[in-house]
């Protein structure tokens, strides 16, 4: 009898844990809709900003220079971005053709950019004393652009974060024993604030999981701690079911996540050494990239990418069915440097003319080629020729769909084509070409 009772007990415990487990996460209808809209949006602005911007040495300055946390924290006393203007930032993103903004609310240094009850290390204790998340959320809602919130799972200052097993933040000067249960509760409290006080949120962008794993590419990337994502993700989906959860762990998506992100890589590529994971075919995919080589404001970084390079990244991403989240690191005074604003303006002008070939399209329908990619909307295929071919034609190997017509998108003039069993040929002689992207529109049967 005793044995039967314990078997029943074990079964009940297993059933309860299955029921609450993110493994069984079934996205709600609003979440599925939000995923589709996210895929349609294609282009977003990433903003890395906070007291870490003050030294002008990137957002990792505390870790890179081994600054003890109690010294580093003093930056809060100088963070007074009097030139910050949410209206200007949101307009800048919209004019660049971006459909959403992903804002750092708390990076690895643990500074909270909003009025949080759960940590004194926050914007209300800086001389600025205004809730940045609120200012941005209100403006995003006003201008009709989605706001996603970046939230670091890793914390370089708190001693309840399991820093003993972490890869970074080792010179912060922490000695007390960590306590993940306490830290988890802290994160849940903060996430509850973010998801209740700022209206509708597009999603939560987690980062820092990799602090507790072997480096990317290692055979075993098991986390040294149990983050209890089912609790964290469950909370978010309960508070705002449409909010999309993504986690920059550089692994295949975990149960409960709604989109997958890549960092500094197009899905399927691994130039950064961070992207060994395969691109998800089920979830929306996003890739983020910097305008120079830094996320946070960096006075020494002049490695600016050209407008052409960034448009190519956007187009190549769309061809692979991925959104592009392009970063700016605003200056500590709240202004965004002209190298960034000029580039965004130019991308916006390109998007005004060519956005139709990007927004609402789907990629991965035809594989990327050396000459470029294809984006698709219904029966229209947009052939993006990014590298002009040496010969006078584009060859689309293995292309099977029946082409009814082909025309240059800019001049609408017909383009000669030929279809053979081995693929399609599009002839470019006489076609209007473009130095950034020659777009050919194919109508399919
Ligand atoms: O450490 C961060 C880094 O500062 C930045 O936020 C990027 C953005 O993808 N993510 C982490 C590195 O993987």
Image (tube, grey):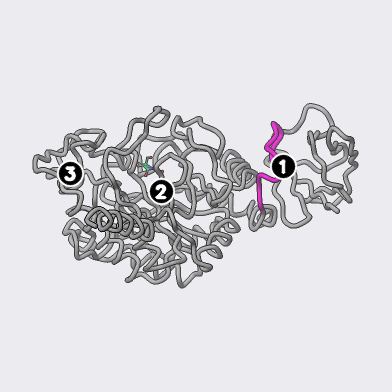
**Can residue 145 be seen from the camera position used here?**
no
Q: Is residue 305 shown in magenta?
A: no
Residue at 48%, 61% (x, y): give it. Answer: 26
Which mark is drawn over residue 366?
1
The residue located at (34%, 36%) in the rendering is 222
Residue at position x 39%, y 27% from top? Answer: 218
- Can you give x and y, in whole percent of width and height, for residue 301 in the image? 39, 35
Q: Which residue is mark 3?
A: 72
Secondary structure state at the residue bearing disc 1: loop
Q: Earlier in the sequence, mark 2 or mark 1?
A: 2
- In which quadrant is the N terminus drawn? bottom left
| Residue 366 belongs to the span the image colors magenta | yes
Look at the image and give the residue range highlighted in magenta: 362-373
The answer to whether any part of residue 368 appears in the image is: yes
Say whether residue 20 is left or right of residue 273.
left
Residue 19 appears left or right of 115: right
* Residue denoted by label 2: 247
Q: What percent of the width, then of the height, locates residue 145?
A: 50, 65
């Amino acid at each position: 009898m005793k044995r039967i009772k314990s078997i029943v007990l074990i079964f009940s415990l297993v059933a309860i844990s299955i029921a609450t487990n993110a493994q069984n996460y079934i996205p709600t209808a609003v979440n599925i809709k939000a995923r589709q809209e996210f895929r349609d949006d294609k282009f977003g602005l990433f903003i890395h900003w906070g007291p870490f911007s003050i030294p002008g040495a990137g957002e990792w300055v505390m870790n890179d220079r081994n600054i003890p946390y109690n010294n580093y924290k003093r930056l809060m006393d100088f963070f007074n971005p009097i030139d910050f203007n949410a209206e200007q930032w949101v307009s800048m993103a919209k004019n660049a053709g971006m459909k959403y903004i992903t804002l750092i609310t708390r990076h690895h240094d643990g500074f909270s950019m909003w009025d949080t009850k759960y940590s004194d290390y926050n914007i209300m204790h800086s001389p600025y004393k205004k809730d940045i998340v609120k200012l941005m959320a209100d403006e995003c809602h006003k201008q009709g652009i989605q706001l996603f919130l970046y939230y670091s799972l890793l914390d370089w200052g708190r001693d309840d974060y399991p820093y003993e097993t972490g890869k970074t933040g080792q010179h912060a000067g922490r000695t007390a024993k960590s306590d993940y249960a306490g830290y988890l509760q802290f994160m849940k409290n903060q996430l509850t604030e973010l998801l209740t006080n700022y209206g509708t949120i597009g999603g939560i962008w987690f980062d820092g999981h990799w602090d507790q794993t072997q480096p990317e590419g290692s055979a075993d990337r098991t986390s040294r701690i149990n983050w209890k994502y089912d609790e964290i993700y469950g909370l978010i989906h309960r508070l705002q079911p449409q909010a999309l959860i993504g986690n920059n762990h550089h692994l295949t998506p975990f149960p409960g996540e709604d989109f997958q992100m890549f960092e500094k890589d197009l899905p399927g590529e691994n130039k950064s050494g961070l992207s060994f994971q395969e691109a998800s075919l089920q979830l929306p995919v996003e890739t983020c990239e910097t305008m120079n080589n830094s996320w946070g404001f960096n006075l020494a970084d002049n490695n600016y990418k050209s407008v052409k390079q960034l448009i190519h990244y956007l187009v190549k991403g769309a061809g692979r069915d991925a959104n592009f989240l392009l970063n700016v690191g605003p200056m500590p005074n709240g202004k965004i440097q002209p190298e960034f604003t000029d580039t965004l303006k130019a991308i916006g002008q390109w998007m005004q003319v060519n956005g139709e070939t990007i927004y609402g399209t789907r990629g991965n329908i035809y594989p990327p080629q050396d000459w470029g990619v294809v984006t698709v909307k219904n029966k229209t295929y947009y052939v993006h020729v990014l590298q002009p071919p040496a010969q006078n034609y584009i060859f689309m190997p293995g292309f099977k769909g029946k082409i009814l017509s082909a025309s240059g998108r800019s001049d609408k003039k017909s383009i000669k084509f030929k279809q053979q069993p081995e693929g399609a040929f599009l002839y470019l002689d006489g076609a209007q070409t473009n130095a950034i992207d020659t777009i050919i529109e194919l109508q399919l049967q």
